[in-house]
Image (tube, helix red, strand yellow):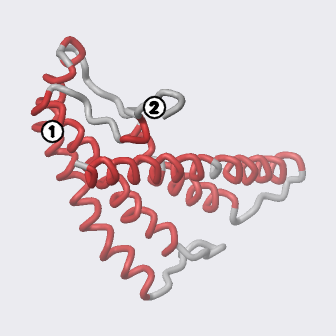
Amino acid sequence: MHFLTAFIRFVDNFNDRMGKIVAFLIYPIMLVLVYEVTMRYIFNSPTIWAHETSCMLYGAHFILGGAYALKHGAFVNVEVFYMRFSKRSKAIIDLFTWTMFYVFVGVLLLKSLPWAWASFSVREFSDSTWGPPVWPIKWTIPFAAFFMLLQGMTKTVKDAYLAVTGRELVPASDVDVPAGN
């Protein structure tokens, strides 16, 4: 049991930190877009790099934030009936329905790894006028899929524990310890 709680704590903390770091990508995206709008409409001198840069940064922001969103339950659910069930019933249902999550993330990981590796091996560049390297952005997909897979595993462990015992599995660091102990 100690291994499972340590694994959950590690993955939760890692994805929480990663999500908070990745969230800061919004600032360079915003700066690039403001710079482009200023150059285009005030100085009549558009850039050749701003649009592609903002797309790449936003893509990394979006895909790498997935595990953070998963940890915090930020994905959209269809809960017409689901919300009326007990926590234990929800956990049992999730154990079955999450197979689709594993299929999606597994395919994403298995398909993106060779794609990212091929891009890295030739040091792929964009074919645009600016021509930045695209292989670093392509690597965000398998990394994000792996982080989501780990976060999904923590949810499955928590759901399985709740389904079997009727109690929620709370890692030791999340339990309030009375003062003086």
Q: Earlier in the sequence, mark 1 or mark 2?
A: 1
Q: Quadrant of residue 176?
A: top left
Taking the spot 17% from the left edge, 52% from the top edge, the residue there is 103
Give the class, few, some or many, for how many residues have Cα within 10 Å of label 1's Cα (few <14, many ≥20): some
Residue 22: where, in percent of width, then height?
57, 52
Viewer-closest of 120 and 88: 88
Taking the spot 27% from the left edge, 35% from the top edge, the residue there is 169
Residue 80: where, in percent of width, then height?
22, 14
Q: Secondary structure at mark 1?
A: helix
Q: Quadrant of residue 45?
A: bottom right
Direction from residue 74 to residue 30 in the image, left or right: right
Viewer-closest of 179 and 130: 179
Point out which mark residue 36 bears. Answer: none
Residue 34: where, in percent of width, then height?
77, 47
Which of labels 1 and 2 is toward the front?
2
Q: CA distance from mark 1 to mark 2?
A: 25 Å
The residue identified by callout 2 is 177
Q: Amino acid at mark 1?
A: Ala
Taking the spot 57% from the left edge, 76% from the top edge, the residue there is 133
The residue identified by callout 1 is 160
Q: Residue furthest top?
A: 84
Q: Amino acid at mark 2?
A: Val
Direction from residue 60 to residue 54 in the image, left or right: right
Q: Secondary structure at mark 2?
A: loop
Viewer-closest of 116 and 167: 167
